[in-house]
Amino acid sequence: MRVAVPVLETEVNGRKLVNAHFGKSNLFAIVDTETGKVELAENPALHLQRGRGIYIAQMFKEKGVEAVLVKEMGPGAFDKIRNALGIKVYLIPTRVKFLDEAVELFKEGKLTELLEPNEDEHEHQ
């Protein structure tokens, strides 16, 4: 299964850090949970002020992403990714800082599925 996680460019001891801000993330790690292979994809909509979700969703679809792991996701992106494309969204607990840790919890079935957006789009303006 291919899962996408927003990540920071910064690494700590060679480990990628999860980016808490989904739509504003520069990079997404697309991880193959079978092989452990990680592909980094740039956010195709970073230059946009609004409506980034549709472009990110399209990229995920093209790359065969089946689940997205996030700390927060606003209503626009949530609607495009989960409701329009049927890609499941899972919540990364706040204590989890690293990509490998988040993917491991997902593989163990320990992440909760996000059934509605958990970020207000106007909060960060």
Image (tube, rainbow, N blue to C red):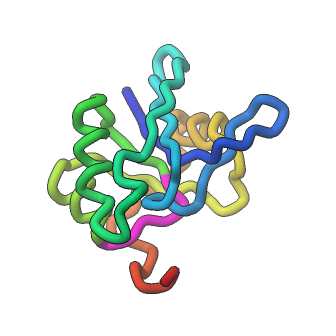
Q: Residue furthest right?
A: 13
Residue at the spot x=75%, y=38% of the render?
A: 11
Residue 66 in percent (x, y) is at: 31, 37
Front residue of 91 and 48: 48
* Quarter of image, res 98: top right
Q: Is 33 on the left or on the right of 64, as rendered?
A: right
Front residue of 111 and 61: 61
Our reading of the magenta stretch's main secondary structure is loop
Front residue of 25 and 77: 25
Instruction: Work out whether 72 lies above or below 109.
Output: below
Instruction: Work out whether 24 lies above or below 88.
Output: below
- Quadrant (top left/top right/bottom left/bottom right) for the N terminus: top left
Residue 59 in percent (x, y) is at: 29, 39
Q: Is 81 on the left or on the right of 112, as rendered?
A: left
Residue at the spot x=52%, y=34% of the render?
A: 107
Does 94 appear in magenta?
Answer: no
Residue at the spot x=48%, y=41% of the render?
A: 28
Does 71 appear in magenta?
Answer: yes
Q: Residue furthest left?
A: 84
Q: Residue furthest top?
A: 35
Instruction: Work out whether 79 lies above or below 35.
Output: below
Residue 119 in percent (x, y) is at: 45, 75
The region drawn magenta spans 70-75
Residue at the spot x=72%, y=59% of the render?
A: 95
Q: How many marks?
A: 0
Q: Residue furthest front?
A: 47
Residue 88 in percent (x, y) is at: 32, 49
